[in-house]
Image: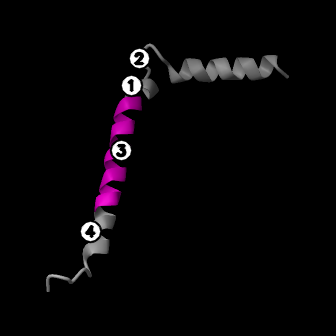
Amino acid sequence: MIFDEKGQGAAEYVLLFGAVIIFAILALGIYYSYFKDQSPFSSSEDLKNVRENVARNR
């Protein structure tokens, strides 16, 4: 019974997916203000700048 490792793979997958989920939640928290225009950086302004640069470089 000490050397029984049948559930080890499943436990490792649970830990891996848990780490990925935590990383995704942290990333969403960091970029939340960026997408809600509550920071000095604005996604709408960035999109506007990209469109102007593309139109200018045609």
Q: Nearer the viewer, residue 1 or 10?
A: 1
Q: CA distance from mark 1 to mark 3?
A: 17 Å
Q: Residues within 10 Å of mark 2 (few under 14, many from 20)?
A: few
Q: Earlier in the sequence, mark 1 or mark 3?
A: 3
Q: Which residue is mark 2?
A: 39
Q: Residue at x 33, y 66 (%)?
A: 13
The answer to whether residue 22 is above or below residue 14 is: above
Q: CA distance from mark 1 to mark 4?
A: 35 Å
State the predominant SS element of the stretch in magenta: helix
Q: Earlier in the sequence, mark 1 or mark 2?
A: 1
Residue 28 position within the rendered picture, expressed as x and y whole percent measured from the top left:
38, 37
Q: Which residue is mark 1?
A: 33
The answer to whether residue 14 is above or below residue 42 is: below
Q: CA distance from mark 4 to mark 3?
A: 18 Å
Residue type, mark 2 in image: Ser
Residue type, mark 1 in image: Ser
The number of discs equals: 4
Q: CA distance from mark 4 to mark 2?
A: 40 Å
Give the label on residue 23, or none.
3
Q: Earlier in the sequence, mark 4 or mark 2?
A: 4
Residue 20 position within the rendered picture, expressed as x and y whole percent measured from the top left:
37, 51
Question: Which quarter of the rendering shows the N terminus?
Answer: bottom left
In which quadrant of the rendered view does residue 18 lie?
A: bottom left
Does the magenta run of residues contain 2?
no
